Image (cartoon, rainbow, N blue to C red):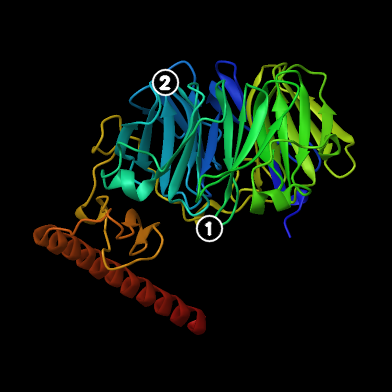
Amino acid sequence: MATQDDDIILVFPAASSGMVHAWDLATGTSLCSFKGNSNALRAACTIGRDYFASCQHQKPILHFWDWRKEQILQKSFVPEKCWSIACSKDGILCAAGGDSGNIHIWDASVGKLLLSWKAHHKRVTTIAFSDKGTEIVAGSEDSLVTVWSLAGVLSQQNQQGSLHTWSDHTMPISQVCVGAGVTDPYVFVCSLDHTISVRSLLSGRLLQKVTLPSALTSIALDPLEYCAYVGSSSGNIFSVSFIEAASDFAQQSNSHTSRNMIKTFKTQCGGVTSLALSRDGATLVAGTEDGSVITWDTVTGQHIRKSSIGAPVATVLVLKYPLGMSGRGRGQMPESSLRMMPLGNFAKVAGSSGVPLKPWQQTMILIDSSSSSNSTIHRVSDEYTITSMMESQGMTQPMPGQEQENVQEQLQARIQELERENATLVEQKNRALSLLKKS
């Protein structure tokens, strides 16, 4: 089981030229800092196991870091100023929400901008992938939440309509959070209208809606999803328990929650800007407008620690101790032992890539019209490219014969190259073993 001893806190300041701070969650010890950040609120994410990124609030730029270096790894100029960013769990796709209401999706490995489309009428303030990476949920200043099928938008067949459009709220959406699971996860939404709503991702049905005393700014989910921690502009954090309402989830919508289901953590440090939980759910971390980072024990409700970064906190993330992280610590490993996931320079123009590509590195959308299984997105031939297997329920189109032949040729060429590389590695291994025996 994951424990807080294996976790770190990543703190992004909102100030210009601020440092991204990495602290040990258990002890509060500073591990390292990463240079060059001016983060928009709640606009940072990890990309796979090797990188993390943030939207810069002053310019249409994304900044990327890897764990081994304190300096910025790369800066990517994107189509517009972005205010939210998320990456699929496997690190294949990265999505950002823009000022105009557009959503942009890139293939992270090569930086190719796959698609941009109009998702909302105003700024996209929050965005999240489903656990299996086949849906995107976005919230906006227009007070709407939309759910999009990636298989649909990448095939450019259903850009005109989302899977769901929810209008439960009357003010801008602060944050959306998609629960775990691949069958029918819950979607948690908090808004400046003082309410938090819970819906089914699959059916879109409203399961629960709770009204709280203050405008809500951020949300973090308990690992078992029995409880949601919701930050507010007043500085209070509300712990809303859904255990007693579990039967309502399966039966009908319930807009009332008894007071004994709500507990309050008081920061006394200004509005809460971002929340995160340790992977075991035992520690809650909050970032505030006055630059404080506060931790609590969620079981006892006791305050553990308070630190300050000297500038408003834009985002806090809690994640597993990264391998190869810059500085000394449990994550430190010899650089030669780490195989980094490829990361391209994100392109500004749709269809283009930030780096020159070989034929087999081109992004391929493979449509399996014979399969009736759920949509999935995965890599082909161990290469970090995208494959979209879509349902045949009116969304698939047969691939033209010539394109099919080209794809097969590209895959065959890549397979042959991998076989040659494997043969070379086997030969080198045998030679090394032979030398060891002689010595």
Label count reads 2
User: Which mark sits nearer the N-terminus, 2 or 1?
Assistant: 2
Q: Is residue 190 left or right of residue 400?
A: right
319 is higher (above) or lower (below) than 229 = below
For this orientation, the residue located farthest to the left is 402
Numbered tag placed on residue 182 in the rendering: 1
213 is higher (above) or lower (below) than 241 = above
**x, y percent for residue 94:** 42, 41
75 is higher (above) or lower (below) than 208 = above
For mark 2, give the secondary structure.
Answer: loop
Q: CA distance from mark 2 to mark 1?
A: 31 Å
Q: Is residue 4 left or right of residue 95?
A: right
149 is higher (above) or lower (below) than 317 = below
For mark 1, give the secondary structure.
Answer: loop
Q: Quadrant of the N terminus?
A: bottom right
Looking at the rendered structure, the kind of residue marked 1 is Val
Which residue is found at the position 38% from the left and 21% from the top?
Answer: 100
Q: Is residue 398 left or right of residue 354?
A: left
Residue 324 can be seen in this image: yes
**x, y percent for residue 110:** 33, 44
Residue linked to disc 2 = 99
Looking at the rendered structure, the kind of residue marked 2 is Asp
| Badge nearest the viewer, 2 or 1 | 1
Q: Is residue 165 left or right of residue 31?
A: left
Q: Are marks 2 and 1 in contact (CB under 8 Å)?
A: no
Q: Say which quarter of the image contains residue 154.
A: top left
**x, y percent for residue 219:** 66, 34
Which residue is more in the foreground, 144 or 218? Answer: 144
